[in-house]
Image (cartoon, helix red, strand yellow):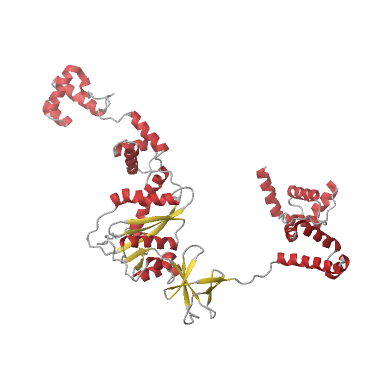
Amino acid sequence: MMDSKAQLTVDIIAKVAEGKITIVNATKLLNKSRRTIERYLQQYQKVGIQFVVHLNTGKAPVNKTPDYLKRQVQALIKEKYFDVNLLHLAELLEENENILVKRETLRSWAHDIHHVKRAKRRRGKARKRRERMGSPGLLLQMDGSPHRWFGDNKSCLIAIIDDATSEIHAEFFKSETTAGCLKVMRDYIDKKGLFKALYVDRAGIFGGPKRCNFSQMQRACDELGIEIIFANSPQGKGRIERSFDTFQDRLVPELRLNNIHDMTNANRYLQDVFIPQFWQQKIQVNAKNNDSEFTSLPAHLNLDDVCVLKEYRKIRNDHTFSYGNKFYLIDSPLKHSIAKQKIEIRKTSSSGFLAYFAGRHLAISEVVEPTKLSMEDLEIQKKMDVLALADKLGNVSEASRISGISRETIHRHRRLIKEGGKEALKRQLTQNIRHKNRTDEELEKLVIDFSLQNPHLGQAQVSLQLKVNYGAEISANGVRYVWLRENMNTSALRVQLSQSLLKIA
């Protein structure tokens, strides 16, 4: 089958051969050179109209990729590399499978099976480009990204990045907390030194509107001489925001491929493999100026004393203070009273803390106050007092008259004491003993079943119908008590319970 272009070529060359069209006119009509027209004419005279068919038509190219390789790569995309982008996929195929495929070929194979990871396209707002800082250490950006990084539960990646070089330090935490941000900043300062400014969003952790002037991060930066700058939009600190896109695009599949499902191994892989081998080699850049703005930590500052959660409590006149609903006494010897002053609490863990005053560590001890007896203990003590009264008088009847407790109850408590001691009395308080005046279980079940079958009937009607149809004697108030115990005292509740039982059935 010839297309229109090939048909035109055959018609014109045939007329040239018949002498109806000159070679010069044929070159103009076909937009070919004279040499090409002469070659067409020679081939037409030899093989006829077959000259228009290229000799390579129907033959596979010499450099064609084998079909088995295409099927192998597509199978790997579906089963193993289903959540990676094309560039990352090409790198992983070359590194892990020893398969080298060109970018466009790989893209066409992925499109054939409708399995291409696309970037999210959102309508953006035009913003003026901001150039990077000239020197490292002038400005760092910090933020956290909650995501399902590994496993089924969400965790948070807290990262800090240099605006001039994109050098990054990051660590996984259970959530974006003040302690996590302090740890990431402390580790970065310990490695590189003090920087000039920190660019963050307006979250309460960093001292935004929610925690204005009492944020732990803001307090730590003030002590270190670091200025906090608040961004008015996420795009303002786009360097850290785009880094999270890269982490979610590349780090998540790599953690899955390496069977990493816990935070410890995820942090180890992030800091020992991903950042050194990928980020530092392909993302990190050189600053415009080689002069670093990082400064060494002054001798009088200790990061362990700054990058820690601190709270303050007022000291009472007796040198005690309260923290965590407990009282503590200052045991350290003091020359002068520090009553009415504020003591510094440094949290070391979720439950532990250290107390400081004027930079000095103070020894403290918990003040244990006597606790009141619970209602359960008071009830047991009351029973023991009645038994002691009966033993003292040697007459159960007299002890019953004085205490108002029946003789049967006193004898029962004596038996329990002999069988299990005081604990037997305690267990009696929590046992589910059915009251002797309560409706029989069979009658209660009949009331419940009939009420669910007829949820629109009231308590009086249910009582009457049970008596007429089943011969069951139960008052309207008895029906209501059953409904209250089963949380079905309204028609709406009975209808809802009836429908749920039908779904289960």
Q: Which of 70/330 is in front?
A: 330
**x 37%, y 66%: residue:** 303
Q: Which of 497/14 is in front?
A: 497
Percent coordinates x, y for residue 381 in the rendering: 75, 67
Residue 13 image-quadrant placement:
top left
Taking 370 as reference, is 274 left or right?
left
Residue 67 image-quadrant placement:
top left
Q: Quadrant of the N terminus?
A: top left
Q: Is residue 268 above or below residue 35?
A: below
Q: Return the residue found at the far bottom.
A: 336
Percent coordinates x, y for residue 420 in the rendering: 75, 57
Q: Which of 223/24 is in front?
A: 223
Q: Which of 425/140 is in front?
A: 425
Taking 456 as reference, is 404 left or right?
right
Residue 125 seen anywhere in this rendered image of the structure? no
- How many labels, in total? 0
Q: Is residue 92 above or below residue 307?
A: above
Percent coordinates x, y for residue 284 in the rendering: 29, 53
**x 47%, y 77%: residue:** 342
Residue 140 seen anywhere in this rendered image of the structure? yes
Percent coordinates x, y for residue 103 in the rendering: 30, 39
Q: Quadrant of the C terminus?
A: top right
